Structure formats: structure tokens, C-alpha cells
Amino acid sequence: MMERVSQFQSYLTDVQSEIKKVVWPSRKDTTQTTIVVFGMTVVMSLFLWLVDTILASLVQLVIG
């Protein structure tokens, strides 16, 4: 039982040291990345809507 406690303490120490190595993005970087993601989502949504509309029209022409 004590060995498990010791292993767990060692694990927590390792986690703490690894967290100190993490480089977190700045608020500006996070905001810019979020804007790019939303922008690309809108662009891709419009593109897929356009492709879907064109393909639906072509299928409608073929089927009649």
C-alpha cells in the first residue's frame, strides 16, 4: 500500500514539473486563432452549401 502512495506522489511530482514546461498561448494568439477558426468554418459552410445546391440541381435535371 505504501508503495502505491509513493508511486502516486512521484507521479504528481512529475506532472507538476511537466506543467511548468508548458508554454501557454497569449490572449491575443488565442483570440486570433479563434477568429481564424470561425472564419474558416463560415467559408467552408458556404462552399459546401454551394456544392450541395449545384449537385442537387444537377441530380434534379438528370432525374427530371
Image (cartoon, helix red, strand yellow):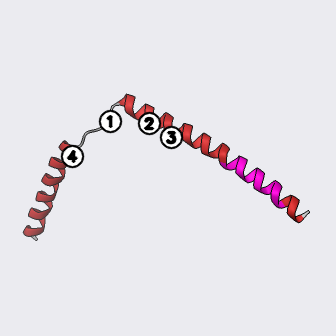
Looking at the picture, which amino acid does disc 3 mark? Val
Q: CA distance from mark 3 to mark 2?
A: 6 Å
- Look at 76% across and 56% down and name the residue there: 55
Pointer 2: what residue? 33
Reply above or below: 33 against 54. above
Of residues 20 and 64, which is closer to you in this image?
64
- Look at 79% across and 56% down and name the residue there: 56
Looking at the picture, which amino acid does disc 4 mark? Ile
Marks 1,2: beta carbons within 8 A: yes
What's the mark number on residue 7? none
Q: CA distance from mark 4 to mark 2?
A: 22 Å
Residue 51 covered by magenta stretch: yes
Marks 4,3: beta carbons within 8 A: no
Q: Judge depth for marks 4 and 2 and give the one in front.
A: 2
Pointer 1: what residue? 25
Reply above or below: 13 against 2. above
Looking at the picture, which amino acid does disc 1 mark? Pro
Is label 2 in a helix, a strand or a loop? helix
Image-quadrant location for residue 24: top left
Residue 18 in the image, given as x and y percentages of width and height:
18, 49
> Across the whole image, how many numbered discs are drawn on residues?
4
Q: In the figure, is residue 49 to the left or right of 21?
A: right
Dot 1 or dot 2: first in sequence order is 1
- Look at 12% across and 58% down and name the residue there: 9
Task: Tell me where the magenta segment starts and ends, as one range.
Answer: 48-59
Marks 3,2: beta carbons within 8 A: yes
Mark 3 crowd level (few <14, some 14–19, many ≥20, 10 Å Cα): few
Can you say which quadrant of the picture contains the C terminus? Answer: bottom right
Residue lying farthest to the bottom in this orientation: 1
Pointer 3: what residue? 37
